[in-house]
Image (spheres, helix red, strand yellow):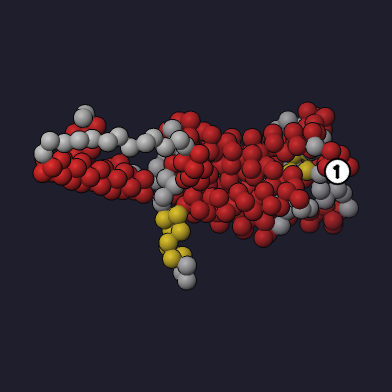
Amino acid sequence: MNVLENLKYRFKNAGIVEQLIYANLAVFLLVLFVNSFGKLFQFDTNLMVDWFALPANFNDFLSKPWTIITYGFLHASFIHILFNLIILFFVGNLFVDYFTKKQLLNFYLLGTFFGGIIFIASYNFFPLFTEDINTNVLLGASAGTSAILIGIATYIPNYSFKVRLIGYIKLWHIAIFFLILDIIQISGNNAGGHLAHIGGALFGFLYVSSASNKELEIFKLFKNLFKKKDKPLKTVYKSGKKASKFTNNKSNNQQEIDSILDKIGKSGYDTLTKDEKEFLFKQGKK
């Protein structure tokens, strides 16, 4: 088996996350080879970027519509691709623990697509980008990885990672951290790129929240702040002893329900024991 056949075999039998990583690496190496030979033979070294990066100008995009997807496999530098692929590896493998391989690919491609839409719309709408609209292009897997990260954070917001010297960090904390970074850096040199990240993240959140009616923890916190609280009803019991027993039973049941729901949020419904599932089912019928 030669090297090419070995690579084909590895790619075919790899998981979807590894396949996306291999595809990005292959395109990155191809761009390097084209640039190297371009210098030797003195032809355009930006050939790959010109044809496959997403242009900011809408008219240029219409002449190269495929770039709305292909830009998601191009990278400007080794550090650029390394950072994106590290994130893709960790959040991608977590994603396929709860969703299918096909859904991961859809999130990557659709996140890339929506990130590209936000990029083009921003450059053709905001006056800030008027001077750069004919020269700027978008490339990188960040919009696709943002969609995956925010999508899985929306689905299991309380999932925790253990970080040395820090302790446990919830997934929604990580998601909000990256979102804030992108928002802050809109005023920087790569404003269009960060807007594309936000576009991918927005797709991930809206898709999962609409499909599962779940929300990021941060949105729940804001909602609870402004939610009108009902005044507690005063109840008079003829027998104080019976009232106390009823209250204790209700309190214990609620604690058990909260504990089970936290377990589902962290590890999924399938991790519940038979007794926990039966208890939850009985409570739901009351």
Identity of the residue drawn at 61% across and 57% down? 83
**Residue 219 in the image, given as x and y percentages of width and height:** 51, 42
Front-most of 3 and 86?
Answer: 86
Residue lying furthest bottom in this view?
Answer: 165
Identity of the residue drawn at 48% across and 30% down? 210
Classify 10 Å Cα crowding around label 1: few (below 14), some (14-19), many (20 and above): few
Q: Can the viewer see residue 77 in this picture?
A: yes
Identity of the residue drawn at 82% across and 29% down? 59
Q: In the image, is 269 to the left or to the right of 275?
A: right
Amino acid type at circle 1 is Asp
Q: Is residue 63 above or below residue 200?
A: above
Quarter occupied by the C terminus: top left
Front-most of 141 and 180?
Answer: 180
Q: Can the viewer see residue 89 in this picture?
A: no
Q: In the image, is 165 to the left or to the right of 193?
A: left
Q: In which image quadrant can residue 72 be found?
A: top right
Q: Which residue is mark 1?
A: 132
**Residue 229 in the image, given as x and y percentages of width and height:** 42, 37
Q: Is residue 228 above or below residue 160?
A: above
Identity of the residue drawn at 23% across and 38% down? 280
Front-most of 55 and 52?
Answer: 55
